[in-house]
Structure formats: C-alpha cells, structure tokens
Amino acid sequence: MRVAVIDGQGGGMGKVIIDKLRKEFHENIDLLALGTNALATAAMLKAGANDGATGENAIIYNINQVDLIIGSLSIISANSMLGELTPKMAEAISSSSTRKLLIPVFRGNMTIIGIQNEPLPHYVEALILHIKKLREEYKCAKQTHT
C-alpha cells in the first residue's frame, strides 16, 4: 500500500504521522512525503518516509499515484497553511478519486461543527486504526483479483 502524507509549513504534523505509521507498520507500508515546501518534505523524510517531493506540481502529479492520501483538513482548502496550499493543489486533492483520510486540524477561519477538538496524538491513533482496517480490505480485494 502506497500512502501519501501531505503537509506544509514546518512539516510537524506530517512528521508525527509518518513517525507513527512507520513504527506501526514498519516497512510494510510505502510512505510518500508530499510537502508544500522543502522544509516540510525534509521533516517527513527524516521521520521515515520512503520518498519525498515538494511543491504544487509534485503534489498534483503524485496524488493519483497512491492508494491513500493523509493530511489535515486544510489540504482541501485553497490558500490554507498561510497560503502555501494553492487553489490548484486543493482542487487536485479534493477532486482525486484516491481515498483521503483527513485529520480535523485547521488553524484557519473554519470551524467544523460537531468535531471534537482532540490533541494530534489522539487523531493519529484513530488514523492508524482506520488504516489497519483499510489494509485488510486492500489485501482482500487484491486476493480476489488474482
């Protein structure tokens, strides 16, 4: 399973996600760090991503080359991350048919009613449980097609 983690600014959230995914799944998951800037990509690579790419074109190109996209809710909002996430990136990500797992962390002027404000580690634990379930579905689907 190839998973893209998208982050910007300092890459702190992506770093936490990749670190936890790597510890949980070891080398049984292929992690692609997609940063809106080089600092974010570097932080995610240091955390254990297999590959990394930076910028608008890299994100737009790679999101349809993976099985899963992970990031904060802001990756589908134009001009989020202090303007680092361009409208073209947001459109490409939200329009992609690739499954997206979005963490409801957003520092902009958006509030999602009904979402509880949890610390990032709680969201990442829920993310890992969801990915375990998806991996089982993915394995079953692959076996059915072979």
Image (tube, helix red, strand yellow):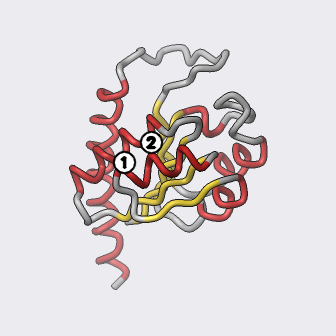
Residue underneath mark 1:
18
The picture quadrant where one finds residue 65 is bottom right
Q: CA separation, marks 2 and 1?
A: 6 Å
Q: Is residue 9 left or right of residue 117?
A: right
Which secondary structure lies at badge 2?
helix
The picture quadrant where one finds residue 39 is top right
Residue underneath mark 2:
14
Quadrant where the image shows the C terminus: bottom left
In percent of width and height, residue 15 lies at 40, 42
The amino acid beneath tag 2 is Gly
In percent of width and height, residue 68 lies at 47, 56
Residue 138 vertical placement versus 108 (above, below): below
Q: Is residue 130 left or right of residue 38?
A: left
Q: Which residue is painted at 66% across and 64% down in the image?
A: 61
Give the numbered dot on residue 38. none
In percent of width and height, residue 37 lies at 63, 46
Q: Which residue is painted at 49% across and 38% down in the image?
A: 102
Quadrant where the image shows the N terminus: bottom left
